[in-house]
Amino acid sequence: MSKVRRTTAAVAMAAIVVLVAGAVVALASSAHFKKGGEPACTIAGSATSKTVQCTGTLAGLGGGDLSIPTTVSGSAVYQCQNGGGNIAPGQNRVLVGPSTVPTNVPGSSVKNGEVTFTTQPNTLTASTTVPGSQAGCPNGNWTGVNPTLTVTDITLKISQDSTLLFTCTASNAAGLTSPVRLTC
């Protein structure tokens, strides 16, 4: 093969690579949630432990891997117990978390630019006891007991091939109620 033909073939191959790479970027740049596929999260559990799991359906994706870490925070309110076993209400909200759990979706799961995802469960657990000063008890001789945990914040950061596509959040200091619709 002549030097001119090899050079022409190399230039043509480079042009094809650039076009294909541009097409993948173009697909990823139009990422969106399908109608009715906006992320929603469920909160389940007990007074001391809450598990959050989120689902959603994306379209307009390229074929790369997705990373969807879920970060959850909350607060617990404790009762105050003195050395004699007497119980009184606490006053302070004790922060619990944040806890971040990764979810990875391989690019092979993206079909025709679409994927429905479910995040890995993210569980917050309140300590069974805390110092009385932390729970808002009358003095340091009391102990915070019987926590009631509330999820207050959920954040999903959705990336494809290390490019951040969406940050979706829900927040309520008084507590989120399941199902929780996230805002992206």
Image: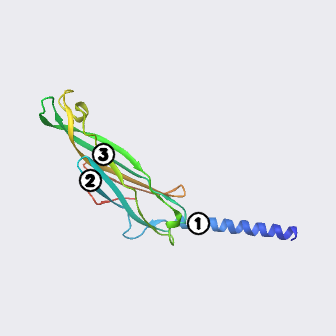
Horizontally, is 87 left or right of 126 in the view?
left
Q: Which amino acid does the dot numbered 1 rest on?
A: Val
Secondary structure under the numbered disc 2 in the rendered image? strand
Disc 3 or 1, which lies upstream in sequence?
A: 1
Q: Could you tell me if residue 30 is visible in this image?
A: no
Q: Is residue 46 above or below residue 56?
A: above
Instruction: Answer whether labels 3 and 1 touch (C-beta < 8 Å).
Output: no
Quadrant location, the N terminus = bottom right
Quadrant location, the C terminus = bottom left
Q: Nearer the viewer, mark 2 or mark 1?
A: 2
Task: Residue 118: give x, y in percent of width and height.
Answer: 40, 61
Horizontally, is 144 left or right of 17 in the view?
left
Residue behind mark 3: 125
Q: Residue furthest right?
A: 2
| Residue depicted at 39% across the width and 71% down the height | 35
| Residue depicted at 15% across the width and 29% down the height | 83
Q: Which amino acid does the dot numbered 3 rest on?
A: Thr
Q: CA distance from mark 3 to mark 1?
A: 41 Å
Residue behind mark 1: 24
Residue 162 falls in image quadrant: bottom right
Residue behind mark 2: 45
Q: Which amino acid does the dot numbered 2 rest on?
A: Gly
Task: Residue 88: give x, y in percent of width and height.
Answer: 13, 36
Instruction: Answer whether labels 2 and 3 touch (C-beta < 8 Å).
Output: no
Secondary structure under the numbered disc 1 in the rendered image? helix
Q: Could you tell me if residue 34 is visible in this image?
A: yes
